[in-house]
Image (cartoon, grey):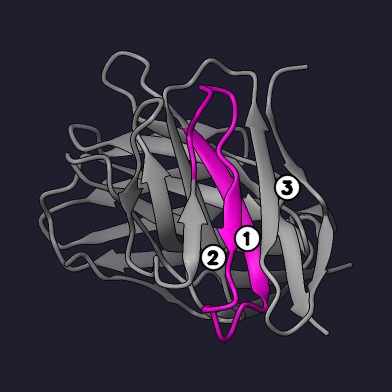
Amino acid sequence: KQEVTQIPAALSVPEGENLVLNCSFTDSAIYNLQWFRQDPGKGLTSLLLIQSSQREQTSGRLNASLDKSSGRSTLYIAASQPGDSATYLCAVGSYNNDMRFGAGTRLTVKP
Amino acid sequence: DGGITQSPKYLFRKEGQNVTLSCEQNLNHDAMYWYRQDPGQGLRLIYYSQIVNDFQKGDIAEGYSVSREKKESFPLTVTSAQKNPTAFYLCASREDRGAKNIQYFGAGTRLSVL
């Protein structure tokens, strides 16, 4: 059974700093990996989707990388802003359409 | 506006009562999902449905029931058998676009016990 771990559980940084969120998974036979943002009391918003054949995806100040062999993905946020404060969830998709979620990293960007 | 609508936003359950959470989508997606989210934990799958009139148990189906009579609707009933129902419930639908496999989420329903 796929296990997904996100470290750290919480992170606080000053505005403008570049930061990296980590996601690790136990089974490298994945179909895709998705990073989501969740604001308090809200649903999930998809940020980036990486297919198993890809190494990275970029959207604006966000860059997600995937290393299947080591079971890791990172989400890089450049020039962080207070509006980036949220919980970031990593989800690993399998070939049977199953999706496993990490517990998330709660990010606070201080002005 | 295309999307997934969950209602109500907040729900309170009395002991011994069954309550139903609504999930409606107008994205024309075949597959729909129900997840439970507890503080400090990832989302856990309760039930999923790949097509109308078919659904499968997820990892934590005990104490829950679903139906899928229409493509657009996938309601979740939290029965009195679910002894710890307080949680945030998220509904999702899946888009199969070529090789992609993307889930879209509703805004969630927070269920509390009175």
**The C terminus of chain B, quarter of image:** bottom right
Residue denoted by label 1: B89
Q: Position of residue A56 (x, y in %)?
A: 34, 38
Question: Callout 2, which amino acid?
Answer: Arg
Tell me the residue that label 2 is attached to: B36
Reading the chain from its start, which is encountered first: label 1 or label 3?
Answer: 1
Which residue is pictured at 38% across the width and 70% down the height? B60
> In which quadrant will I find the N terminus of chain B?
top right
Residue at mark 2: chain: B
Do circles 3 and 2 both sit on a common chain?
A: yes
- The range drawn in magenta is B67-93
Residue at left offset 42%, top offset 67%: A102
Residue sitting at the far front:
B16
The residue to which callout 3 is attached is B107
Please report contact status of discs 2 and 1: CB closer than 8 Å, yes or no: yes
A42 to the left or right of B94: right
Q: Is residue A6 above or below residue A83?
A: below
Q: Alpha-carbon distance for marks 2 and 1?
A: 5 Å
What chain is tagged by disc 1? B
Q: Main secondary structure of the magenta part?
A: loop
Amino acid carrying mark 1 in the image: Tyr
